[in-house]
């Protein structure tokens, strides 16, 4: 069925896809505020707002919110990213009304109770410790701080000092200032009649209507170069490397995804085969694409023995050079295109993916790209496209490398060489 689009009276856009074979509905409320919109003293405040919205409204306490959908088999949760936040709920079709009611209540009527705020601030301090104790998470955060400027690079959860010092009124003021209809939209996927969607979603009756968006545009980002290392007494060395990438809406983004798939997406990828299968140097190695409105990276992650850091990073450099100089063979390109198409088509069987895809597409493209259009774009990728893209983003060398573990810092550059130059 086609995606239905309409606006609430307060201006919030709504996108709805009805799927008759489902027994559920998934709702996402997107707020165009993320960690990238924070000034330096505010780092972590968007994420803190997300937590506080679940701590009580005028009619529900935190337990009421938690129980509301769980006791009928549903879910309610949220996440904060660098460029937006999303509050979502999933419930059986018969409880669609309750899902809308609870989501609208916590977004519109949250109280930010002082006692709850003090407790939740402690929770986030524990969350920060959890990330610090996870070498993979820590290494990823270090890479972001290394390769991006402050706006994109600072941790979404903030720092312990900033979270300890921030006050309830500051966080509540940020919520009141930044959350409003002009910076929100809603995506829904489920087996619900259209008239019921119109009726129930009207519960998002945000009273504060502003003529203009309160979310200020962020400054143009840039990639920076550097090497970062954190010594930890752990068994493995955790490594991340960043090469140049593309903005999320770049016309040739699927060419980059093809290179990513070839290098490190799955057990058949070049790095997995070379590092794990042929040499047994790692259990886990993969590549990833991080893309934002104006910038992006192609990243590599690996965990290996502390004594094998140089060996692994040497292989990484060799595989990067091979793709840069030789591109991808015809048979391999065909395989990677089939992989990308298959991943997309299989993901569409998940309502949560469809809801998220609608949200991301609406936010960055202003339209929902038909699946057939994406498949056709992938099928049109040529060897020349891949070779050109590989030369463009890999010839500059890597931008940043980070490492966590108990090994000499110099091993990070012994295998890779020094960061490249623009």
Image (tube, grey):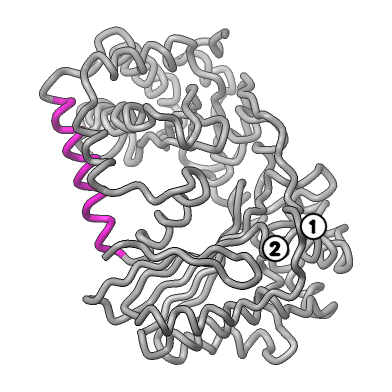
Instruction: Report the span colored magenta.
Output: 332-350
* Local crowd size for mark 2, using a 10 Å CA cut-off: few (<14), some (14–19), many (≥20): many
In the rendered structure, the answer to whether residue 343 lies left or right of residue 62 reads left
Q: CA distance from mark 1 to mark 2?
A: 8 Å
Q: Residue at x 49, y 36 (%)?
A: 291
Q: What quarter of the picture does the N terminus occupy?
A: bottom left
The numbered dot on residue 124 is 2
Point out residue 290 in the picture as x, y percentages from the top left corner.
Answer: 48, 37
* Local crowd size for mark 1, using a 10 Å CA cut-off: few (<14), some (14–19), many (≥20): many
Q: Residue at x 76, y 53 (%)?
A: 214
The outermost residue toward the left is 331
State the predominant SS element of the stretch in magenta. Answer: helix
| Residue picked out by circle 1 | 163
Earlier along the polypeptide chain: callout 1 or callout 2?
2
**Marks 2 and 1: in contact by CB < 8 Å?**
yes
Q: Residue at x 27, y 41 (%)?
A: 373
Point out residue 399 in the picture as x, y percentages from the top left corner.
Answer: 55, 20
Q: What element does badge 1 sit on? A: helix
Residue 279 drawn above or below residue 37: above
Q: What quarter of the picture does the C terminus occupy?
A: top right
Q: What element does badge 2 sit on? A: helix
């Amino acid at each position: 069925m086609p995606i239905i689009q309409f606006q609430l009276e307060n201006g919030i856009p709504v996108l709805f896809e009805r799927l008759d074979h489902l027994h559920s509905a998934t709702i996402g409320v997107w707020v165009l505020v993320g960690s990238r919109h924070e000034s330096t003293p505010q780092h972590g405040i968007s994420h803190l707002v997300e937590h506080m919205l679940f701590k009580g409204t005028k009619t529900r306490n935190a337990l009421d919110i938690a129980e509301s959908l769980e006791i009928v088999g549903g879910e309610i949760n949220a996440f904060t990213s660098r460029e937006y936040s999303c509050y979502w709920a999933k419930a059986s079709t018969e409880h669609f009304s309750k899902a809308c009611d609870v989501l609208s209540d916590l977004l519109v009527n949250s109280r930010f109770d002082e006692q709850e705020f003090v407790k939740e601030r402690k929770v986030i301090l524990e969350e920060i410790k959890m990330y610090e104790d996870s070498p993979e998470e820590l290494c990823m955060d270090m890479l972001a701080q290394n390769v991006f400027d402050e706006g994109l690079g600072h941790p979404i959860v903030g720092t312990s000092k900033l979270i300890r010092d921030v006050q309830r009124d500051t966080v509540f003021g940020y919520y009141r200032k930044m959350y409003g209809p002009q910076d929100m939209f809603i995506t829904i996927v489920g087996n619900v009649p259209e008239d019921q969607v119109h009726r129930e979603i009207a519960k998002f009756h945000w009273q504060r209507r502003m003529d203009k968006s309160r979310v200020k545009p962020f400054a143009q980002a840039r990639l920076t170069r550097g090497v970062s290392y954190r010594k930890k007494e752990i068994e493995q060395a955790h490594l991340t490397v960043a090469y140049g990438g593309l903005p999320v809406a770049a016309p040739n983004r699927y060419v980059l995804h093809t290179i990513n798939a070839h290098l490190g997406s799955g057990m058949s990828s070049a790095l997995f085969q070379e590092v794990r299968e042929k040499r047994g140097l790692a259990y886990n190695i993969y590549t990833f694409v991080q893309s934002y409105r104006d910038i992006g990276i192609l990243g590599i992650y690996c965990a290996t023995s502390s004594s094998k850091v140089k060996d692994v990073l040497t292989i990484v450099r060799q595989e990067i050079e091979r793709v840069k100089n030789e591109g991808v063979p015809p048979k391999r390109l065909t395989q990677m295109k089939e992989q990308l198409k298959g991943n997309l088509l299989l993901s569409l069987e998940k309502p949560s993916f469809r809801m998220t895809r609608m949200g991301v597409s609406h936010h960055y493209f202003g339209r929902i790209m038909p699946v057939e259009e994406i498949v056709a774009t992938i099928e049109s990728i040529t060897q020349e496209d891949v070779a050109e893209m590989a030369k463009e983003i890999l010839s500059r060398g890597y931008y940043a490398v980070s490492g966590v573990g108990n090994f000499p810092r110099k091993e990070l550059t012994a295998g890779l060489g020094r960061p490249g130059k623009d």
